[in-house]
Image: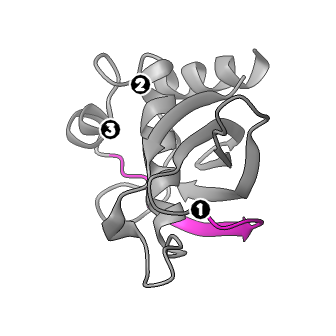
Amino acid sequence: MPVTSEVRVRYAETDQMNVVYYANYLVWFEIGRTDLLRAAGLSARLSYDRLEKEHGCILPVAEARCRYRSPARYDDRILIETRPAMLRGSVIKFAYQIFRANEGAERELLAEGETVHVVCDARMNKVTLPEPYASALKNMMTE
């Protein structure tokens, strides 16, 4: 089951043509991923911060993919749907869909993509995701 986040396109995120600069979609992916972890109960009890400080794990992005379907523009209301797509040992994949929320109409798919993360220690050696985090993400994949 995906978690939905909402943002409104800021002027600073657009170019002179009033179109959102392509790299901002990756920032929106991060917003979605953070909200997904919060919804899984990982923000207070099992946060990114605790993962790093108590377990010595970081989640660098190993791969990012985004397919752009329609441009987002200044002041659009954007919905970011995020779901965990795969968890295997030290590799986590998140999937995203970004929609324009049209008032009184169907939402419009603007972009979709994935990020792949490798769970690492501080020396960038691969490690397995600690069990409480792995269980929470697996539970979200089966809902």
Q: Tell me how the rendering is colored.
A: one colour
User: Is 31 displayed left or right of 80 in the figure?
Assistant: left
Query: Magenta stretch: residue 94 in it?
Result: no
User: Is 114 displayed left or right of 29 in the figure?
Assistant: right
Badge 1: few (under 14), some or many (20 or more) residues near its Cα, within 10 Å? many
Name the kind of residue labelled 2 in the image.
Arg
Q: Disc 2 or disc 1, which is closer to the eye?
A: 1
The numbered dot on residue 38 is 2
The numbered dot on residue 72 is 1
Q: From mark 3 to mark 2, how far is it between C-alphas?
A: 10 Å
Residue 122 visible? The answer is yes
Which tag, 1 or 3, sits closer to the chain's start?
3
Q: From mark 2 to mark 1, how far is it between C-alphas?
A: 26 Å
Q: Residue at (39%, 68%) from the top-left corner?
A: 13
Query: What residue would you read off at disc 3?
Result: 48
Q: From mark 1 to mark 3, how far is it between C-alphas?
A: 29 Å
Q: Secondary structure at mark 3?
A: helix
Q: Is residue 95 above or below residue 5?
A: below
Q: Residue at (51%, 82%) from the top-left corner?
A: 17
Q: Secondary structure at mark 1?
A: loop
Which tag, 2 or 1, sits closer to the chain's start?
2
